[in-house]
Image (tube, grey):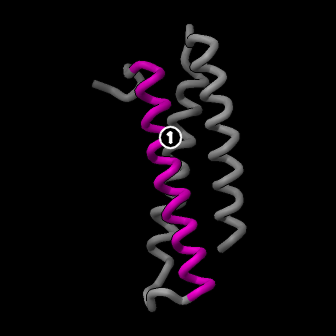
């Protein structure tokens, strides 16, 4: 089954999971860079964080581009796109 064939609720749920995981990994990376909790390179963690956030953003945009979407799912997708977009820009500028 293709991702485009999945219901909007499932896509939004996966978008949230990918996005929140990316945000948490990015926050962990920033905290480690500031407080030196673990002596490990944060480059790969930053990359995975940005990748997960972009993937979540892509899923929410996929819901926005679908036809015949319920109004409540459309509003959730708009909010998810806004939140993930702002978070992505923040973590890009924090590098």
On the image, the x and y values in percent for residue 34 come to: 62, 84
Secondary structure predominantly adopted by residues drawn in magenta = helix
Q: Is residue 70 above or below residue 95?
A: above
**Towards the viewer: 4 or 49:** 49
Q: Residue at x 72, y 67 (%)?
A: 93
Q: Residue furthest left?
A: 1
On the image, the x and y values in percent for residue 86 come to: 71, 50
**Towards the viewer: 86 or 67:** 86
Q: Is residue 29 above or below residue 83?
A: below
93 vs 51, left or right, is right
Label 1 sits on residue: 16
Q: Residue at x 46, y 54 (%)?
A: 21
Placement of the N terminus among the 4 image quadrants: top left
Placement of the C terminus among the 4 image quadrants: bottom right
Callout 1: helix, strand or loop?
helix
**Region in magenta:** 7-35
On the image, the x and y values in percent for residue 54 come to: 54, 49
So how many labels did they put on this image?
1
Tell me, yes or no, whether the highlighted magenta stretch contains residue 13. yes
Mark 1 residue crowding within 10 angstroms, few (<14) / some (14–19) / many (20+): many
Q: Quadrant of residue 66?
A: top right
Tell me, yes or no, whether the highlighted magenta stretch contains residue 95. no
Q: Is residue 60 above or below residue 92?
A: above
Q: Residue at x 55, y 65 (%)?
A: 26
Q: Residue at x 45, y 63 (%)?
A: 48
């Amino acid at each position: 089954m293709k991702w485009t064939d999945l219901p909007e609720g499932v896509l939004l749920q996966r978008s949230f999971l990918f996005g929140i995981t990316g945000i948490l990994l990015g926050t962990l990376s920033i905290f480690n860079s500031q407080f030196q909790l673990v002596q490990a390179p944060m480059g790969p963690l930053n990359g995975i964080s940005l990748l997960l956030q972009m993937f979540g953003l892509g899923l929410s945009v996929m819901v926005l581009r679908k036809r015949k979407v319920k109004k409540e799912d459309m509003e959730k997708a708009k909010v998810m796109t806004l939140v993930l977009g702002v978070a992505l820009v923040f973590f890009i500028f924090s590098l």
